Amino acid sequence: MSDTPMKGTTKERITGKTDMKNWHLPHKGNTKQVILDLAEDLLVKRGFKGFSYKNISTLLGIKNAAIHYHYPTKSDLGVEIIRRERVRFEEFVAGLELEQMNAAQKMETFLDKYRNLPDSKDRITLASALEMNFKVLPDEMQEETRKLIFAYIDWLEDILKAGLEDAAFKFSGSPRDQASLILSILHGAMSLAQATDDSFLDAATRQIMLTLGK
């Protein structure tokens, strides 16, 4: 998951009320990577229909052709954003295995990714933003979004099964249903926080552990 703010990058500097005229940024190094980073932030903060290649090129001080060179269509760009997020999640899971955490520790670390989101009205993950925009996403992006969501649910199911086996967790229903419930609670709480305040997301993470008997 890429929920932790990235220091010293375009991600740190974008707000929902950005003055486009003040966004001529130097782009050093991997232009493809910079485009991807900025596009991801715009997708999360404005929605898929809320930004264009023109927005990206203006903010980065490059030509539209430079974006089309790396990502011929906006759908191509969106698919790459989602696939990168799946890789990040796989790396996150691999890191937990290296740390040899038990099921409860893994769950707490997963929930920390939500607890540690920036305290703002933009306190939302890429996956949640994709769900909110799902109906307007191109077919290719819808398919990749499903794969991302099921990657979360599959992993949560495995953790919940392990927690039951070592008596770390106690809950009613199947691990699969519980995994779906946990993700639904988290993403629903992010939606509520958009309209109200951050307390809904903080409460959700606390209640999830309580429902697991922790």
Image (cartoon, rainbow, N blue to C red):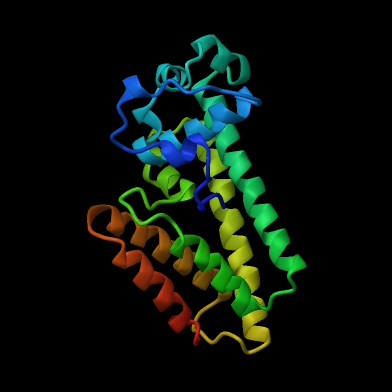
| Front residue (pair 138, 107) | 107
Q: Is residue 135 above or below residue 22?
A: below
Where, by quadrant of the figure, is residue 18 drawn? top left
Q: Position of residue 204 (x, y in %)?
A: 38, 70
Location of residue 139 in the rendering, given as x and y in whole percent from the top left corner = 50, 32
Judge from the rendering whether residue 188 lies leftward or rightward of residue 32; answer left or right. Answer: left
144 lies above or below 36 = below
Q: What residue is shown at x 43% (from left), y 50% (from top)? A: 128
Numbered circles on residues, count: 0
Q: Find residue 91 and report its horizontal and vertical position in percent.
A: 69, 53
Query: At x 42% / y 63%, what residue is drawn?
Result: 186
Q: Is residue 43 visible?
A: no
Would residue 127 be visible to someone looking at this image? yes
Q: Residue at x 53, y 45 (%)?
A: 6
Please state the horizontal and vertical placement of residue 79, each as a whole percent of the image. Answer: 57, 33
- Residue lying furthest left in this view? 196
Horizontally, is 44 left or right of 179 in the view? left
User: 58 and 84: which one is in front?
Assistant: 58
Which one is in front, 179 or 83? 83
- Residue in the picture at 37% in, 40% down: 45
